[in-house]
Image (cartoon, coloured by chain):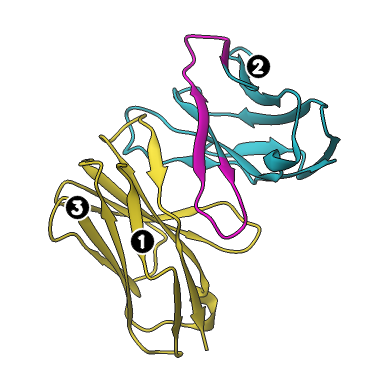
Chain colours: A yellow, B cyan
Amino acid sequence: DAMVIQNPRYQVTQFGKPVTLSCSQTLNHNVMYWYQQKSSQAPKLLFHYYDKDFNNEADTPDNFQSRRPNTSFCFLDIRSPGLGDAAMYLCATSRDEGAYEQYFGPGTRLTVT
Amino acid sequence: QQQVKQSPQSLIVQKGGISIINCAYENTAFDYFPWYQQFPGKGPALLIAIRPDVSEKKEGRFTISFNKSAKQFSLHIMDSQPGDSATYFCAASKASNTGKLIFGQGTTLQVKP
């Protein structure tokens, strides 16, 4: 089945220790998104890639970076995690930009100690 | 003008009853309105979506009603089941944008047996 895969599902990191979350997709979609979702809140878009073009949301902290080495994979790097970065991180894909369906992965739960 | 307002925040329905969740938006440029279902610890799953050229869309027990003049849309879950207990998010986006979903605040639905 075509799908969006996120690894790891659970990640524990120490305050200030860099961490990388990964996302892969078998849908061959052009667009990949990263969202942050805190408890009892809606997902909040951090940034997205349209093919190789990176689009950052204006309010995304510099602490968050992303890489997309190829169509299938996308990474979220948190350079110096703070306690406030503990959240569920969701990857999503879409066939194209614009008003198209987005398909979410299962998420990575990040804990910062 | 970018907000999507969702109500109620929480909802308790008896098994077999109808669950109704409402959303309102301001930006008339929105042209895609999806609903997502999210179970605890999982990523959101696309449930059903509508575009403003139709007033209603039905898929199984799930129906979206769309009122363009009132700038409102709602999700109806017929014959609600305990397995429907989840958090539901409405969202909106516009084709001229990057596909960014503007989410409502979410509704936690509990269906009692």
Q: Are marks 1 and 3 in contact (CB under 8 Å)?
A: no
Mark 3 vs mark 2, CA separation in Å: 41 Å
Disc 2 secondary structure class: loop
Whether residue A57 is visible here, answered yes or no, is: no
Number of labelled discs?
3
Residue that badge 3 annotates: A72
Q: Amino acid at mark 3?
A: Ser
Q: Amino acid at mark 2?
A: Ala
Residue that badge 1 annotates: A6
Residue that badge 2 annotates: B70
Answer left or right for A65 relative to B66: left
Please name the residue shown 32% across and 32% down the image: A98
Answer left or right for A36 relative to A3: right
Please name the residue shown 84% across and 36% down the image: B13
Q: Quadrant of the C terminus of chain B?
A: top right
Parent chain of label 1: A
Residue A63, how many percent across, how many down? 35, 75
Parent chain of label 2: B
Please name the residue shown 37% across and 89% down the image: A17
The quadrant holding residue A84 is bottom right
Provide the residue span drawn in magenta: B37-58
| Residue toward you, B24 or A102 | A102
Q: Is disc 2 surrounded by few (<14), some (14 to 19) or many (20+) residues within 10 Å?
A: few
Mark 1 vs mark 3, CA separation in Å: 12 Å
Judge depth for marks 1 and 2 and give the one in front: 1
Parent chain of label 3: A
Is B5 within the magenta? no
